[in-house]
Amino acid sequence: KQKNIAENKASDYLRKLNSKLEDLVASRTATLEKANSDLALLASQDSLTGLLNHRSSINQVSKALNEANRYNISIAVIMIDLDNFKLLNDQYGHQVGDEAIVSVSQVLRSNLRDTDSCGRYGGEEFILIITRTDLDEVNQLAERLKSNIAEIHLSQTPDANVTASFGIAMCLSTQCEEYTTDSLISAADSALYKAKLSGRNKICFTPSNQMV
């Protein structure tokens, strides 16, 4: 009888110990998974704006292009560059330049759908990946963004003007197989260059889907 009592106590103690160990392992696992998730998020984000960084932006374009080919949908890549940003930095300082970049990033983020993506491509240049869209929708979005950016008032220099130029490459559902990730970004960049040459604060599409 004493032996049975001792064995039962030992078994009960082992069950409690195993339960505590399982809880501890689960807690440690959850903590580790969260830490890994946080690290992955940090690795994909631009430190100043919280948008996708350069590498993650390119990956997102690739993902959107694959989706467009698979489901026969249209997507657009929009390259955005702040006008005369070097002059703004030189005249008012880097803190004002950073404020302009953050303010523009907030405008971009607030005007996009959950299905769209936005990244800081580098310096004062941004990239948008718009999915399941058409020419009119993309043009309306770009016009709205251009207008909202022009309305930005910087806290430290309220007299400074912030404008941006837009280059858009529209990948229609019937054309997406013709593009690679690099060629789609390059097409948007070429349209951006055209917008810069035409006087800045402009919106230009690639020649193949130029708005009339």
Image (cartoon, rainbow, N blue to C red):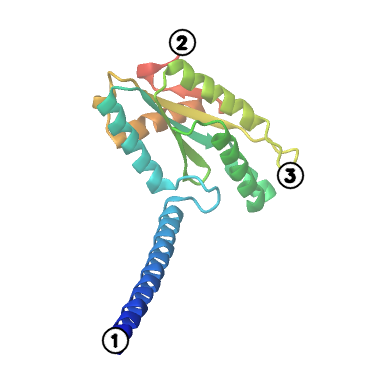
Q: Residue at x 27, y 29 (%)?
A: 179
Label 2 or label 3, whichever lies nearer to me, is 3
SS at circle 2: loop
Q: Give me the C-alpha separation between circle 2 and circle 3.
A: 38 Å
Q: Residue at x 65, y 30 (%)?
A: 150
SS at circle 3: loop
Residue found at the far bottom of this picture: 2
| Depth order, front residue of 58/160 | 58
Q: Residues within 10 Å of mark 3 (few under 14, many from 20)?
A: few
Task: Please report contact status of discs 2 and 3: CB closer than 8 Å, yes or no.
Answer: no
Q: Give me the C-alpha separation between circle 1 and circle 2.
A: 95 Å
Q: Give me the C-alpha separation between circle 3 and circle 1.
A: 82 Å
Residue kind at label 1, given as amino acid type: Lys
Q: Please give the residue where the numbered disc 3 appears in the rendered image.
A: 155
The quadrant holding residue 75 is top left
Task: Please report contact status of discs 1 and 2: CB closer than 8 Å, yes or no.
Answer: no
**Residue 61: percent from left, percent from top:** 36, 36
- Of the numbered discs 3 and 1, the one sitting upstream in the chain is 1
- Of the numbered discs 1 and 2, the one sitting upstream in the chain is 1
**Residue 57: percent from left, percent from top:** 40, 42
Label 1 or label 2, whichever lies nearer to me, is 1
The quadrant holding residue 111 is top right
Q: Please give the residue where the numbered disc 1 appears in the rendered image.
A: 1
Residue kind at label 3, given as amino acid type: Ser
Q: Residue at x 28, y 83 (%)?
A: 4
Q: Which mark is residue 212?
A: 2
Residue found at the far front of this picture: 1
Is residue 101 left or right of 136 when viewed as pictured?
right
- Of the numbered discs 2 and 3, the one sitting upstream in the chain is 3
